[in-house]
Image (tube, rainbow, N blue to C red):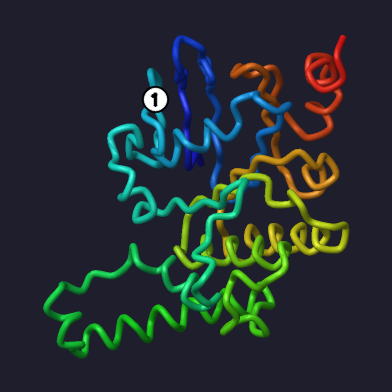
Amino acid sequence: MSLLRVENLSIAFGGVKAVDGVGFEVSEGEVFTIIGPNGAGKTTVFNLISRIYPPTSGRMLFGDTALERVAPHRVAGLGIARTFQNIELFEHATVLDNLLIGRHCHRATGLLAELFFLPKVREAELADREAVEKVIDLLDLAHYREARVAGLPYGVRKVVELARALAVRPKLLLLDEPSSGLNTEETDDMVWWIRDIKEELGITVLMIEHDMSLVGRVSDRVLALNYGKVIASGTPAEVQGHPEVIEAYLGA
């Protein structure tokens, strides 16, 4: 069953089409990966799905919801969370506080209830803390729970950003180059976590990735972009062996 369907998606910046008629479907429970050389339009596709940019044309259906009609601040509440190519965390807050921020979209308590810390607010706080602690256990972050993000190694911060996205309790998780800047051991850990996210948590993953080893180990299907257009799609092996993909990476 299709969870996300993208149809003829396009956006232009100053007359240059960064994404040009892109279409694909992501099925529930799969890891779907977008690859392509730098400047191919991969992150722009993510920015369109998460509503940072409005599309020039095309449709994005998340279930029965037309994402192009959804306000950006409503996207997380629909069940879409993401990480960023450049880590976006509150560096002077603790790991725990960063993860609790990921729970904000689920809070239904009003201003007065929050001001007087009514019982329903206390219940919500406990539920948020319980959800966050489960993510901390899953990603082995207990040692860093009270640490400030600014003092953490890069690899740990990448995991914290993943944890904050999982705290949203998403149906669809957008991972923008999750292995970027990681060493071999950290990349191996990321492989296992992506598998656990899919198999244990039942979360659908849409990923951008340059590390073709990681792509081959976790992806069910792959889409290749170049100059904003789709040049190949299929299994990891089919796409990696496609002549246009080889030419895009290595030249004619």
Q: Residues within 10 Å of mark 1 (few under 14, many from 20)?
A: many
Q: Position of residue 201 (x, y in %)?
A: 58, 65
In the rendered image, the vertical position of residue 17 relative to residue 190, given as above or below: above
In the displayed structure, does residue 154 sit left or right of residue 186? left
In the displayed structure, does residue 126 sit left or right of residue 8? left
In the rendered image, the vertical position of residue 54 relative to residue 232, given as above or below: below
Q: Residue 252, located in which quarter of the rendered image?
A: top right
Q: Nearer the viewer, residue 121 or 202?
A: 121
Please report the residue visible at 70 percent of the width from the left and 32 percent of the height from the top.
35
In the displayed image of the protein, which residue is found farthest to the left? 112
Please report the residue visible at 29 percent of the width from the left and 40 percent of the height from the top.
70
Q: Position of residue 222 (x, y in %)?
A: 70, 33
In the rendered image, the vertical position of residue 58 relative to residue 144, given as above or below: above
Q: Nearer the viewer, residue 31 or 227?
A: 227
In the picture of the structure, the residue carrying the numbered disc 1 is 55
Please report the residue visible at 54 percent of the width from the left and 67 percent of the height from the top.
91
Q: Position of residue 99 (x, y in %)?
A: 49, 71
Q: Position of residue 211 (x, y in %)?
A: 80, 42
Q: Nearer the viewer, residue 105 or 222?
A: 105
Q: Residue 154, located in which quarter of the rendered image?
A: bottom right
For badge 1, the amino acid type reads: Pro
Count the labels in the image: 1
Question: SS class of the residue under badge 1?
Answer: loop
Please report the residue visible at 65 percent of the width from the left and 25 percent of the height from the top.
39
